[in-house]
Amino acid sequence: MQFTSEQRLDGDITERRFTLGEIPGILWTPPSASPTPLILLGHPGGLGLDRMYPRLAARARYAAANGFAAATIELPGNGDRPVLDVVAQARADLRQALAAGEPVSDDIIDRLVLPLVEQAVPEWQATLDALLALPEIGGPVGFAGGVIAIGIRLATIDPRIVAADLFAGSYVPRATLEEARQITIPLHVLLQWDDEGNDRQTALDLFDAFGSKEKTLCANMGGHTGVPQSAADSAAAFFARHLK
């Protein structure tokens, strides 16, 4: 891991950009005493860190205000990273199906999501290795956001993830539904009830499939970007219970 820039944000939060091999990322740390628990900030595919930065920085500021460090990385095929041809074609097929008013097939969903999961999860784990080697980061570790299939795979295979706040706003392969049954860590799941890009019933089926004994569904009226402040407060209280 190489840090490439550093700046101070309001609240005396330190923001450092880094690269891990060819993977760009950002680490935010609060002014509180080290070592600090860590939240990995997931984000949707197809947009890239530059376009997502305002929303990610706002989430990181909120995490820091609650005593957590936060980090994110560029997803495969996003930003300046090499295009994933199979995902790009699936995204084009998805747009065509939606424009025609046709149902989105399992094949399109698999090609859109699964290659991203297969590459992104090992990258998240390598990033976590590097972050936990820093003296200011001590764990425990939580995951927050999407792509939800990435969060599910991480929560399934990496014991360092002890709690997850998952955003139900992306397509879910059938294989991911099966993986969800293996999850046992505490979960907080955010669902926007009127999300135009989300299949509500699939989100509810996914929540039902989770094997965790402690799981909470936070459902609010509104579209994909209409998440109320109360949902962030609920997630913060969730992480305060499980990361401190």
Image (tube, rainbow, N blue to C red):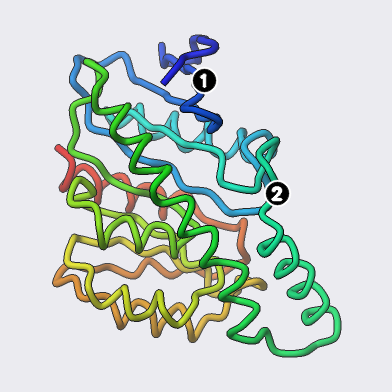
The residue tagged 2 is 83
Q: Quadrant of residue 50?
A: top right
State the image coordinates of residue 225 (x, y, percent, origin top left).
62, 56
Query: Would you say the residues marked 2 and 1 are in contact, meaning their CB atoms lie under 8 Å apart?
Result: no
Picture quarter containing residue 194?
A: bottom right
Separation of marks 2 and 1 at Cα, in angstroms: 22 Å
Tag 2: Cα neighbours inside 10 Å, few (<14), some, or many (≥20)? few
Q: Which three-letter amino acid code belongs to the residue tagged 1?
A: Arg
* The C terminus - image quarter: top left
Tag 2: amino acid: Val
**In the visual, does 174 lie left or right of 63?**
right
Which mark is nearer the camera, 2 or 1? 2
Closest to the observer, 193 or 172: 172
Question: Which quadrant is the N terminus positioned in?
Answer: top left
Q: Residue 210: x percent and y percent?
A: 27, 75
Give whichever of 240, 84 is nearer the camera: 84
Find numbered disc 1 in the image and state the secondary structure of the residue it sits on.
strand
Between 224 and 140, the one nearer to me in the picture: 140
Question: In the image, is residue 184 above or below residue 164?
Answer: below
Q: Which residue is mark 1?
A: 17
Instruction: Left or right? Give the position of 231 relative to 79.
Output: left
